[in-house]
Image (tube, grey):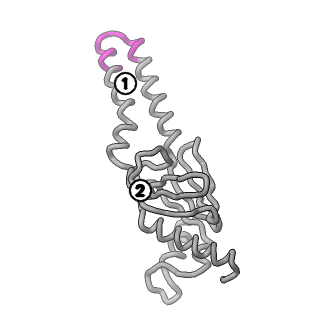
Amino acid sequence: SRCWFCSWGASQFSLSGEIGMVESVADTQSTRVFESAIDRWLFAVLISPFFVTAGFGIYLLIDGQADGAVILFLVGAGTMLLTAALAIPCRYTMTTDHLHVRCGITYFRRIPYGKIRSIQPSRSLMNGPALSLNRIAIATPSSVVLVSPKEREQFIEELEKRLSAFSNERSGEV
């Protein structure tokens, strides 16, 4: 668990007390978490199987077919649990030298800053750990990872800052 004040306060106030982002090497040493944006239409698609099976289950219950209704309720609940397990949490964590991408219980990827070749906005329909089509394509030598942080511009700015600090550190230019 992170300290809310420590993570918020350190990045919001400069030494002079003015509100703003602290531009320093120390700022790139901290961990920053970006949650995924979620498109409303995608949310509706993800939860619709539960409501469809629940609706048919209620119909079967009213029709006197309790066994069929129970089966449909269980299928709906199982579908909802599986969907949640595959999609929650969906977040992107920047650490000192890596971008960690997590989506549900099955997708976890650690991308070293030194492997990132490009960052660009995308609206690709390709599969990725992103719950919105307002995405960012992060290219590495072996793949492209699509992410969709809520704070898209801040994410790009922060990642570019960390990439710059990382390359300066590696070349000895602190």
The residue lying toward the viewer, choosing from 8 and 134, is 134
Q: Distance between the residues labelled 2 and 1?
A: 34 Å
Task: Find residue 129 and report its horizontal and vertical position in percent.
Answer: 50, 48
Task: Classify mark 1: residues with Cα within 10 Å, few (<14), some (14-19) or many (20+).
Answer: many
The residue lying toward the viewer, choosing from 148 and 146, is 146
Comes first in the chain, label 2 or label 1? 1
Image point 36% across, 49% down: which residue? Answer: 39
**Which corner quadrant holds the N terminus?**
bottom right
Residue marked by disc 1: 53
Task: Find residue 41 and report its horizontal and vertical position in percent.
Answer: 32, 43
Task: Find residue 112 and report its horizontal and vertical position in percent.
Answer: 64, 61
Q: Give the range drawn in magenta.
A: 57-69
**Which corner quadrant holds the C terminus?**
bottom right
Secondary structure mostly taken by the magenta-highlighted segment of the chain: helix
Task: Classify mark 2: residues with Cα within 10 Å, few (<14), some (14-19) or many (20+).
Answer: some
Q: Specify the amino acid type for callout 1.
A: Thr
